[in-house]
Image: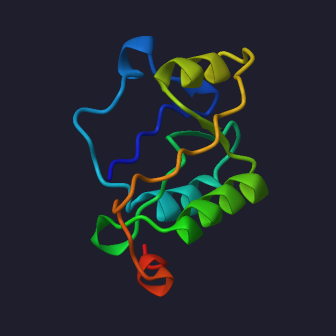
Amino acid sequence: GVVRILARAGRRVADSFVVPPLGKGANVIDGPALRWLATRPRPRIWVSDGHVRGVGDRAAAELDADARGICAKGGILRVPDAAAAKAALRGGPAPPPPAPAEPTAGEGDVEPEAGLDC
């Protein structure tokens, strides 16, 4: 995964740098990145669909729940896309993120203990 830092010390990058990622990447970085983000100054914004992956890029409901807990405890706002991140960074109203969709059948079926490693 890739961690993008878009603002620091009261300054943010130009709009041209706030773009969707290229291609589809794995989410195994989400848990560690959210834990790091929770220690940083506000605002804390996570652009994501809310689904988190574990070892072997496998989905697990426990990982999604862990991410929601980290966000709630760490004051992290999850937004669905770059446009919502821009609005939040500008101090505008950001709509609450939609609930994560359920993974499709067979997508990332895994034993819970195997999916808890990030």
Front in this rendered view, residue 20 or 90: 20
- Residue in the picture at 61% in, 33% down: 9
Image coords of residue 115 (percent x, y): 44, 76
Q: Residue 78: name its quadrant.
A: top right
- Residue in the picture at 63% in, 16% down: 87
- Residue in the picture at 36% in, 27% down: 20
Quadrant in which the C terminus appears: bottom left
Front in this rendered view, residue 54 or 30: 54
Front in this rendered view, residue 99 or 43: 99
Q: Residue furthest front?
A: 105
Q: Residue furthest bottom?
A: 113
Relative to 16, does residue 47 appear above or below in the rendering?
Answer: below
Tell me which colouring the rendered structure shows: rainbow
Mark count: 0
Front in this rendered view, residue 18 or 78: 78
Q: Residue furthest left?
A: 23
Q: Residue 80: name its quadrant.
A: top right
Image coords of residue 72 (percent x, y): 76, 54
Image coords of residue 88 (percent x, y): 66, 23
Image coords of residue 73 (percent x, y): 77, 59
- Residue in the picture at 50% in, 41% down: 49
Relative to 22, does residue 39 appear above or below in the rendering?
Answer: below
Relative to 66, does residue 24 appear above or below in the rendering?
Answer: above
